[in-house]
Image (cartoon, grey):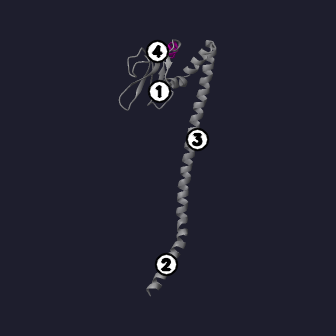
């Protein structure tokens, strides 16, 4: 039987929630599943806690030949399960695999922290630019009367010319 590891949508309209299931590839998206191996909530803001995978069961099904769909593969990459499966395919020992996955998780944590810092720096720059714009808006307001003086002189000249034409 050709099995797939894919998402099954549940939840109400505009509030999606997915179960990660093992299903025959010929069945429809929301058909009856062979086994449920996790869940995924795309509306959750924290991307590290918006899914749950039963890694041991997924590995067993992958060993039996189940195919993974793209969305589930992305979740597996995010959790490190895809790396674990890749290393198992290369024939590495369990200790080496666990060490490699632990190193990957440390690097991933560092990358996430760097992204958070970059976002904070970007927000601070935006706030600084807004503050600079406010200061710039206030400064020309003070200089504006100086610039209006030549305009007033021009208006007076126009009025004098109009009066001469009338006389």
Q: Is residue 96 magenta?
A: no
Mark found first going from the N terminus, 4 or 1: 4
Number of other residues with Cα within 10 Å of mark 3, as a class: few under 14, some 14 to 19, many 20 or more: few
Nearest to the eye among marks 2 and 3: give it: 2
3 and 1 marks in contact (CB < 8 Å): no
4 and 2 marks in contact (CB < 8 Å): no
Snapshot quadrant of residue 92: top right
Query: What is the C-alpha distance between the residues marked 1 and 2?
Result: 71 Å
**In the rendered image, which residue does mark 4 sit on?**
2
Mark found first going from the N terminus, 4 or 3: 4
- Most common secondary structure along the magenta stretch: helix
Mark found first going from the N terminus, 2 or 3: 3
Return the x and y of residue 52 as percentages of the image width and height. Answer: 47, 21
Number of other residues with Cα within 10 Å of mark 2, as a class: few under 14, some 14 to 19, many 20 or more: few
Query: Which of these two is toward me, 108 or 4?
Result: 4
Nearest to the eye among marks 4 and 1: give it: 4
Residue at disc 3, secondary structure: helix
Residue visible at 52% across and 62% down in the picture: 141
Return the x and y of residue 149 as percentages of the image width and height. Answer: 53, 72
Position of 81 compared to 163: left or right? Answer: right
Query: Which of these two is toward me, 16 or 144?
Result: 16
Residue visible at 56% across and 50% down in the picture: 129
**In the rendered image, which residue does mark 1 sit on?**
50
Return the x and y of residue 167 as percentages of the image width and height. Answer: 44, 88
4 and 3 marks in contact (CB < 8 Å): no
Mark found first going from the N terminus, 1 or 2: 1
**In the rendered image, which residue does mark 2 sit on?**
158
Q: Quadrant of the N terminus?
A: top left
Instruction: Report the span colored magenta.
Output: 55-61
Number of other residues with Cα within 10 Å of mark 1, as a class: few under 14, some 14 to 19, many 20 or more: some
4 and 1 marks in contact (CB < 8 Å): no
Return the x and y of residue 77 as percentages of the image width and height. Answer: 55, 24
């Amino acid at each position: 039987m050709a099995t797939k590891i894919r998402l099954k949508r549940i939840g109400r309209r505009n509030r999606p929630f997915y179960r990660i299931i093992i299903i025959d590839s010929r069945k429809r998206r929301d058909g009856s599943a062979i086994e449920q191996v996790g869940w995924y909530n795309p509306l959750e803001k924290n991307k590290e806690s918006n899914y749950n995978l039963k890694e041991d069961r997924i590995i067993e099904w992958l060993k039996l030949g189940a195919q993974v769909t793209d969305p589930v593969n992305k979740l597996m990459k995010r959790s490190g399960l895809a790396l674990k499966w890749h290393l198992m395919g290369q024939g590495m020992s369990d200790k080496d695999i666990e060490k490699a996955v632990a190193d990957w998780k440390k690097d991933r944590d560092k990358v996430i922290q760097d992204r958070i810092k970059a976002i904070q720096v970007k927000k601070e720059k935006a706030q600084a630019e807004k503050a600079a714009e406010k200061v710039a808006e206030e400064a020309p307001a003070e200089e504006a009367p100086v610039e209006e003086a030549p305009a007033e002189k021009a208006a007076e000249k126009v009025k004098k010319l109009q009066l001469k034409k009338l006389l």
